[in-house]
Amino acid sequence: MEKPIFVLNGPNLNRLGTREPQIYGTTTLAEIEQMCRNAVGAHPLRFHQSNAEHEIIGWINEAIDGGAGIIINAAAYTFTSLAILDALKMFQGPIIELHISNIHRREVHYQNSFISKVATGVIVGLGAGGYPLAVTAMLEFLRGGYGTNRHST
């Protein structure tokens, strides 16, 4: 059986659809999950969201033990969590960092990503449509189509 792709979502992303729609759009997290499932086809997918840092770290640890790749939108934890960074450093497969908004055009405190330091690739500013793009890119990484699928620290 193929190892699953983990799609991990951080704090407040459960409020998508109503949270600051001028920044994040009106697509809900449930709709995004369905977009990811449509994009992944038959490949197994684990889709999670938590407002708790320790739960996200737990899912990263599950991926370390048996995941093919990680797509992560850690939301605010992107800019604050050394613990998530340390967990991601242990993962040997591809990591795609994802943000709905373009963090580089936002306030300065949204511009220093810890996760970028270990990400294989980064997708920002494409709205909810960035998610199926990330899934498609992850599948290509797993097929070896983009060269190395490992990150370096």
Image (spheres, grey):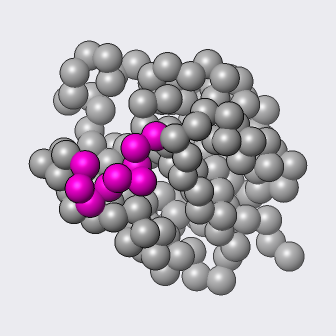
Asked whether 86 or 133 is in front, the reply is 86
Which part of the image, by quadrant, shows the N terminus? Answer: bottom right
Asked whether 152 or 128 is in front, the reply is 128
Tell me the chief SS of the magenta region.
loop
Asked whether 137 or 16 is in front, the reply is 16
Which part of the image, by quadrant, shows the C terminus? Answer: top right
Q: Position of residue 24 (x, y in %)?
A: 24, 50
In the orientation shown, which residue stands out farthest toward the left? 22
Judge whether 107 appears above or below 122 on screen: above
Q: Give the side of residue 151 with respect to residue 137, left or right.
A: right
In this rendering, the count of numbered labels is: 0
Residue 139 visible somewhere in the drawing: yes
Residue 60 visible somewhere in the drawing: no
* Rendered residue at 32%/55% (across/down): 16
Residues in magenta? 11-19
Q: Is residue 118 magenta?
A: no
Q: Position of residue 141 (x, y in %)?
A: 62, 57
Q: Is residue 17 magenta?
A: yes
* Rendered residue at 40%/49% (across/down): 13
* Rendered residue at 46%/76% (across/down): 34
Q: Position of residue 89 (x, y in %)?
A: 72, 29
Q: Position of residue 98 (x, y in %)?
A: 44, 45
Judge whether 129 appears above or below 41 on screen: above
* Rendered residue at 51%/48% (across/down): 9
Q: Give the side of residue 56 with respect to residue 130, left or right.
A: right
Q: Give the side of residue 28 with respect to residue 97, left or right.
A: left
Judge whether 143 appears above or below 12 on screen: below
